[in-house]
Image (tube, helix red, strand yellow):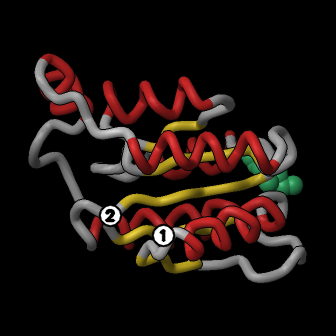
Amino acid sequence: MKFFAASDHGGFPLKKRLFKHLQSKGLDCTDLGCDTNESCDYPDFAALLCRQILKNPGSRGLLVCGTGIGMSIAANRFHGIRAALCHNSLEARLTRLHNDANVLVLGGRIIGEELAIDILENFLETPFEGGRHSRRVEKIDPKKIEE
Ligand code: RB5
């Protein structure tokens, strides 16, 4: 599975820590920025990441900003992106099982590193349950609206 990560300055320290974790697992992961603590605009990085996810079917991503809220609003504007803002591991597991979320969103100023790693692990390891959930997920992204 290809994995992409991106953040703004508010999410940069946590993204950096999580990216190291992803690399240590041997995952094929790409950091799309930002690369410093300097102030920048989260919608730019949400757009960069969402375009990569849509270009690489089956890939997944991680977005981090200060609260996670701006990133999730921006990411969910993209048809085909199901971005889930998670504050605990149960949410991460359930959003994979039920929503087939392809982007995990975290608030770098909201949660600690250890919890974030556990949330990320649940997001990576949990498959989509399918069945009745497939019908519901298809209703989120009706075919042929716009690209
Ligand atoms: C940046 O200061 C902050 O607004 C941003 O990281 C994020 O929390 C927006 O939702």
- Screen quadrant of the N terminus: bottom left
- Name the kind of residue labelled 1 in the image: Phe
Tag 1 and tag 2, C-beta contact below 8 Å: yes
Q: Which residue is mark 2?
A: 59
Local secondary structure at mark 1:
strand
Q: Quadrant of residue 13?
A: bottom right
Q: Which residue is mark 1?
A: 4
Asked whether 119 or 30 is in front, the reply is 119
The disc at residue 101 is: none
- Name the kind of residue labelled 2 in the image: Ser
Q: Residue at x 83, y 59 (%)?
A: 10
Q: Residue at x 51, y 38 (%)?
A: 84
Which badge, 1 or 2, comes first in the chain's sequence? 1
Q: CA distance from mark 1 to mark 2?
A: 8 Å
Q: Residue at x 68, y 31 (%)?
A: 87
Local secondary structure at mark 2:
loop
Asked whether 73 or 92 is in front, the reply is 92
Q: Is residue 17 above or below residue 72?
A: below
Queried on whether the Cβ of the residue with tag 1 lies below 8 angstroms from ligand 1, the answer reads no
Q: Residue 95 appears at what percent x and percent y?
A: 42, 30
Q: Is residue 43 left or right of residue 77?
A: right
Q: Is residue 114 above or below residue 25?
A: above
